[in-house]
Amino acid sequence: MNIVGVRIDGRLVHGQVANLWTPKLQADRIIVLDEQIINDNIQKSGLRMATPRTTHLSVLDYKTAADHLLNDRYGTQRLLLVAKRPKEFLDLIDEGVKIDSINVGTMSQTNTTQMITKQINVEQEDIRVFDELNAKGVHLFAQLNPSVEAHDFMKLLNDKINR
């Protein structure tokens, strides 16, 4: 497995991921983890259009992604994994995929979220998953794009959430 980046981003593949993170990480393939989009050709087409021409795109559920990663399906390709929520990455880890760190990017605000930063809003379930990822030794950091400073996400989370 040649995972060079793991990012939570509610927008999946868009300007920041396609034009900033992909070149910065020199990613050859973006793997989007999303169980709904794998069956939605319109959304998959939109993701393909947003993906840089020199980069491959895979849209997979976590079980298929784990199988492909654990069986070295991508050879020497540099992989950027992206999902809307942290749960997909916890599921990957539980399947045996090693993830050392996760960049917590944009998570949109809804009526049921709590604001951590202007760009990061979490559901109660996300908080539980972040705690579990942290307990498994995954380094969680918040960095909107490569040109800004990274921050310890668990510190940001703990400063905002009453426990």
Image (cartoon, rainbow, N blue to C red):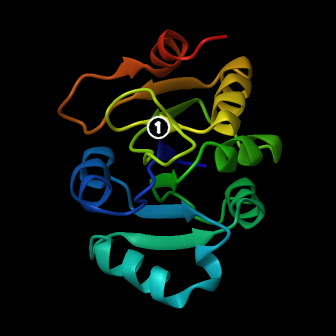
| Image x and y of residue 41, in percent | 53, 89
Q: Residue at x 49, y 16 (%)?
A: 160
Left or right for 54, reference 120: left
- Tell me the crowding category of disc 1: few under 14, some 14 to 19, or many 20 or more residues within 10 angstroms, Cα based: some
The residue where tag 1 is placed is 121
Residue at far left of view: 147
Where is the C terminus found, in terms of image quarters?
top right
In terms of image quadrants, where is residue 25?
Answer: top left
Observer-nearest residue: 45 or 157?
A: 157
Q: Is residue 101 left or right of residue 94?
A: left
Q: Position of residue 92 (x, y in %)?
A: 72, 48
Position of 50 relative to 83 (above/below): below
- Judged from this view, the residue extending furthest toward the bottom is 41
Residue at 65% over, 45% down: 89
Q: Residue furthest front?
A: 111
Tally of numbered discs: 1
* 125 is higher (above) or lower (below) than 163: below
Asked if residue 133 lies left or right of residue 120, the reply is right
> Which residue is at the front of the view, 40 or 79?
40
Dot 1 falls on a residue whose secondary structure is: strand
Residue nearest the viewer, comparing 160 with 75: 160
Image coords of residue 90 (percent x, y): 72, 41
Q: Residue at x 65, y 66 (%)?
A: 73
- Seen at 24% across and 60% down, the residue is 15
Q: Position of residue 155 (x, y in %)?
A: 49, 11
Q: Say what amino acid the circle numbered 1 marks.
A: Asn
